[in-house]
Amino acid sequence: MDNQNEPTKLGGWLILVGFGVVLSPIYLLITSATTYFPIFGDGTWEAVTTISSEFYHPLWGPLLLGEILFNFGKAIVLIFMIYLFFSRDYLFPRFYTGVIVATLIFIPLDAWMVKIILPYEPMFDLETTSTFITTLVSGLIWVPYMLFSQRAKATFVRRKTGSEIQPQESAFPD
């Protein structure tokens, strides 16, 4: 007999979401490490943050540190989202949506800052455009699914208080 108070199992299209949730922090940490570690080891950091350097710009330091902090913070949130997803916590759709929205805001802001530092470079290079479009398309598909699908509503219900749970229809008339 199916118990209506039990959350729906993780299945259907949520399996694809689950793959993304598990792989995202791994991908982010690998790409961040391969991007930022060399900057501190090959002399790039000194070149762009030393006033007497020909490559110096006062915004390089804040830009690079901001990118590192954003990506590190995002990785922590993504790891926490793995827990929320597999525990079927009601906060998962909210965190999922928040990460996508934050990323969609961060990408153009970051590109704008790079454009200020490197005015002759295109604001949206191929990599930036690709990342933005991928995030946008993913958000356009999965955010509505997280917020409006019956499966997501029935799956992510753990830890809800009584006022947040939709009342179940009673088997007994009033």
Image: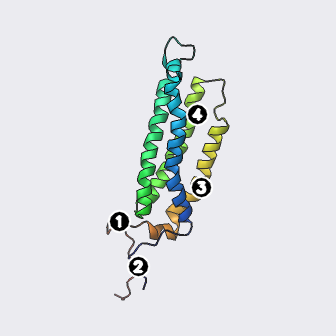
SS category of the residue bearing label 1: loop
Residue 173 at x, y percent in the picture = 36, 89
Q: What residue type is labelled 1?
A: Lys
Q: Which residue is identified by label 3? A: 140
Nearer to us in this view, 20 or 98? 20
Q: Which mark is residue 4?
A: 2
Closer to the N terminus: mark 3 or mark 4? 4
Closer to the N terminus: mark 3 or mark 1? 3
Closer to the N terminus: mark 4 or mark 1? 4
In this view, 147 is above or below 139 = below
Q: Which mark is residue 60?
A: none
* On-image quarter of the C terminus: bottom left
Q: Mark 3 to mark 1: distance in Å?
A: 26 Å
Marks 1,2: beta carbons within 8 A: no
SS category of the residue bearing label 3: helix
Residue 52 at x, y percent in the picture = 51, 10
Q: Which residue is identified by label 1? A: 160
